[in-house]
Amino acid sequence: MEEVRRELQKVKDVRPGKQDTTKKRKREGNEGPKIFIHCSILWKLPYWEDLLVPHILDVMHIEKNICDNILGTLLQIEGKSKDTHNARLDLYDMGIRHALHLQEDGNSVRMPPACYVLNKKNRIGFCNFPKEHQVFTWVCSQPIKMHKW
């Protein structure tokens, strides 16, 4: 880990994008081969050094964001859903999924519910599921003792 950090310290003046490859860049005498092309912003996090497996952090954040977006859309959480007026206007512009286009209702615009959105009864059931099935919490917290059921 420390070796990687030393190599990243050498990466200072890096410009993203295509570079002029006709000229060769001169290296200083004490500078070794360049392994990295840029330093990730994640290396600046205060807890990055303490992570046992730091390269997993990106995957964890991506999984969390995807899960938040899917749950936000299914449960119609305001501000978390990706099913917005702009998304419906995009469907209209592309000429697809006509049942989901925005519908004018007098002076207002109505957004018809999509087939993947849960109604109120199903949302309540979805949120109560972990509460009703406490055994899953016990099984996950006691993985070694599972064979003694």
Image: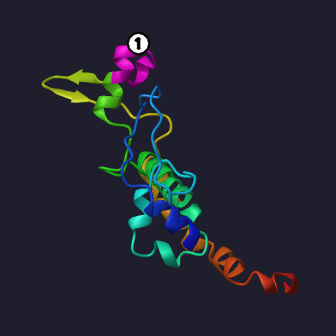
Quadrant location of residue 106? Answer: top left
Label 1 sits on a secondary structure element that is: loop
User: Closer to the camera, 117 or 49?
Assistant: 49
Vertical placement of residue 13 versus 116, above or below: below
User: Closer to the camera, 104 or 147?
Assistant: 147
Residue 29 seen in the figure: yes
Residue found 47% across the figure and 28% down from its top: 21
From the top left corner, tell me how far across and down residue 109 is, in percent. 21, 27
Q: Is residue 92 magenta?
A: yes
Q: Quadrant of the C terminus?
A: bottom right
Query: Which stretch appears magenta?
Result: 90-100
In the image, taking residue 5 as reference, residue 81 lies left or right, namely left
From the top left corner, tell me how far across and down residue 118 is, in percent. 47, 46
Q: Amino acid at mark 1?
A: Gly
Characterize the local packing of mark 1: few (<14), some (14-19) or many (20 or more) Cα atoms within 10 angstroms.
few
Extreme residue toward the left, this view: 107
What coloring was used for the rendering?
rainbow
Vertical placement of residue 78 versus 3, above or below: above
User: Closer to the camera, 20 or 81?
Assistant: 20
